[in-house]
Image (cartoon, rainbow, N blue to C red):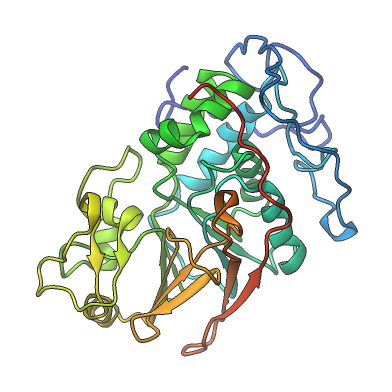
Amino acid sequence: MSGGPHGGLTVPSVPSLSSPCPLCLSLSPLCPLCPLTVPTVPSVPSVPSIPSVPLSPSLSLPCPLSIPPLSPLRPHCPHCPLCPLCHLTVPSLSPLSPVSPQTEKVTVCGDTHGQFYDLLNIFELNGLPSEANPYIFNGDFVDRGSFSVEVILTLFGFKLLYPDHFHLLRGNHETDNMNQIYGFEGEVKAKYTAQMFALFSEVFEWLPLAQCINGKVLIMHGGLFSEDGVTLDDIRKIERNRQPPDSGPMCDLLWSDPQPQVSCDPPGCPQGPGGVTMFGPDVTKRFLERNRLELIIRSHEVKAEGYEVAHDGRCVTVFSAPNYWGHWGDTGDTGDTGVAVGQCPWWHTMAAVSPCSPRPTTGE
C-alpha cells in the first residue's frame, strides 16, 4: 500500500452519502474506494453463512450498516467493502490521545469476541448508539467467535457515524499474535485476503489504550501496572501505534488482572502465569488516589454474572460475551456510568441470544 500519515494508510476522501453506501457497492474485483486491487476470493464452503434473521424494528441500522440479511457484510464477496471503512476509521481514531477527553453518561461494554448476535442484543436492550446514547467498547472485539469481521465492521461503522460519542479501546486481542492463534486472521483470509488482515492490523494499532470519563472513571481493557507511580500523563505518552511489548505499561493496560490479595510493596506487583501482572486492592487504591480518580472499569476476564466488583468497589470487570466460546455458560454485561460525581455505576446483565455458532474452519 502507498504511504500516508496514518501508519502507512492512504486515507481517501469520504464518499458522498448520495453515492452508493461503501458496504452496498455492486460486486467487483476492484474496490472503487480503495487503492488495492482485491483478487476474486473463491467461495469457501467451510465458512458458515449468516442466516437471514429479521431485525427488530428498533434495530433498523443506519447507513453504512443497513444490509440484509442481518450481517453487515457478505462473506466471500470478491470486492472488499472493508477497505474504505478501515481507511476512514483511522482518522477518527488517530487524533485521540490514549486518555480521551471527558464524556457524558456512557454505556461501557466489555469483550464481544466475534459474537455478532449478542452485539445486536446489546443494542436491542440498551438502544442504538447516538449522540444521546454514547458507548465505549472496551476491546477484544475479535477472535474466538464466528463473526469477528461482522462485529468489527459494525463497530467501525458506528465510529464513523458518531466519532465523538462512540469509542473503541484496544484489547489484547487487537494484536497480531493473538489474531494468528485465536482465529481472526484465518477468518479474514477465508472471507477476504491476507491484505485485508494487514489493513485491520494497522487500524488496530491506532486504537486508544484507555479512556477517562469526567475525570473520575478510568477505563482500560486489562488493568493496572507492574510499576507503582504511573499517572494519567504517563498513559498519554505511551506510543500506542505498534504491536505491544512483552512488558511495561502498554502491556499491562492490555493484559493485567486484579487479585484479591494485597500485592507486594511498590514499585512492583506479583506476576501470574505467563508473566501477566496481578494487581491487588492496595495498588488500585494508590493509583486512584494519585490520579484523583474514583473507579477503574476493565474487561479481559470471563465473569459468571457478566461483571464483578472488586477491590472495595474500586475495580469493576465488565464482560459482554455471554455463553463465551459456546461452553462457559456465563451471562454478559454492560455497565452505564453516570455523569454525577460519586454516582454509582449500574449494570445490565444479559443471556446469550442463541448458542454460539460454529467457528469457521480456516485451516488454522
Quadrant in which residue 271 is drawn: bottom left
- Tell which residue pokes out farthest to the bottom in this image: 342
- Residue 41 in sight: yes
Residue 350 higher or lower than 3, as above or below? below
Name the residue rendered at 71%, 50% in the picture.
Answer: 117
11, 296: nearer the viewer = 296
Residue 32 higher or lower than 330, as above or below? above
Name the residue rendered at 78%, 33% in the picture.
Answer: 21
Q: How many marks?
A: 0
Residue 113 at x, y percent in the picture: 55, 48
Does 76 sit left or right of 108 as displayed?
A: right
Residue 237 higher or lower than 92, as above or below? below
Quadrant in which residue 285 is drawn: bottom left
Residue 253 higher or lower than 350, as above or below? above
Name the residue rendered at 28%, 65% in the picture.
Answer: 224
350, 342: nearer the viewer = 350
Residue 105 at x, y percent in the picture: 59, 75
Name the residue rendered at 28%, 51% in the picture.
Answer: 250
Does 37 sit left or right of 226 as displayed?
A: right
Residue 295 at x, y percent in the picture: 40, 79
Residue 50 at x, y percent in the picture: 76, 36
- Residue 129 in sight: no
